[in-house]
Image (tube, helix red, strand yellow):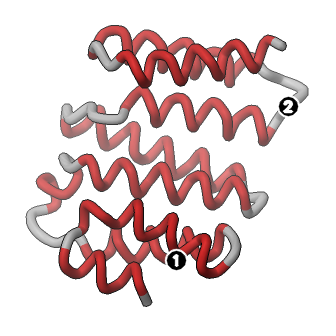
Amino acid sequence: MLSSLVCQTNPTKAFDSARRQDRIHGGPCGLLTGAAFGLNRLSGPRDRIFRTSSYRLIKIALAEAEAQASEPDRAVAILDEALATSNRTGYRAFEAELHRVRAETLLRRGPANPAPAEDALLTAIAVAAQQGTRSFELRAALSLVRLNF
C-alpha cells in the first residue's frame, strides 16, 4: 500500500498519500483507509502528536472522506474532536480550516438549515483573521459567499 510506505518514513506526507490512495482506489474509502493508517502510524508522546499539523490535516481528510461517503454525522464528530484537541493543547494550526470544513459538512448534513454552517464559517473567518492566515480567511469567506447564493 502506497500510503503505508510513505507514512512509515514521513508522517507529514500522510495527507498527500491519502489523496493519492483515493485516486488509486477510486473513492473515499481509499482516502479514509490511507489517512487512518497515517494517523495510527504517528508515534511519540501523545501531546507531541496532537501538536502536529499532520494530525489536523489527517483529521480533515478523514472528515471529508466520511462526508463523501454519506456519513456527515461521523465527519462532524471527527472535526469536533480535532477542535477539542486544539483547545486542549493550545496548538491552533489549521483551526480555521477545521471550522470551514465543519461548516461545509454541516451544510451537507442539513441543507434546509444553513445557520449552523454560517456560524462555523464566521468563526473560521474570525480565527483566520486573528491568526493572520489570509489564505484560510479567503477560503472561509468564499465558502460563506457560496452559502449565501
Expressed as whole percent of the image width and height from the top left, the position of residue 109 reads: 78, 41
What amino acid does circle 2 point to? Pro
Location of residue 77 in the rendering, given as x and y in whole percent from the top left corner: 56, 49
Q: Which residue carries the number 1 mark?
A: 33
Q: Is residue 117 above or below residue 13?
A: above
Left/right of residue 113 with respect to residue 82 in the rendered view: right
Q: Residue furthest right?
A: 112
Q: Position of residue 144 (x, y in %)?
A: 66, 16
Counting from the top left corner in percent of width and height, residue 8 is at 23, 81
Decide: few, some or many residues near mark 2? Use Cα within 10 Å; few <14, some 14-19, many ≥20. few
Residue drawn at point x = 39 percent, y = 79 percent: 3
Q: Quadrant of the C terminus?
A: top right
Residue at the location (29% across, 54% down)?
A: 54
Q: Secondary structure at mark 2?
A: loop
Reading the image, the residue beneath label 2 is: 111
**Residue type at mark 1?**
Thr
Q: How many marks?
A: 2
* Mark 1, other Cα within 10 Å: few <14 / some 14–19 / many ≥20: some
Q: Residue at x 30, y 85 (%)?
A: 5
Quadrant for the N terminus, please: bottom left
Given residues 118 and 74, the one toward you in this image is 118
Near-viewer residue (67 or 7): 7
Looking at the image, is 108 positioned above or below residue 57? Answer: above
Of the two numbered discs 1 and 2 in the rendering, the one whose residue sits closer to the viewer: 1
Left or right relative to 95: residue 30: right
Element on which disc 1 rests:
helix
Q: Is residue 93 left or right of residue 25?
A: left
Going from N to C along the chain, the mark reached first, 1 or 2, is 1
The residue closer to the viewer here, 49 or 80, is: 49
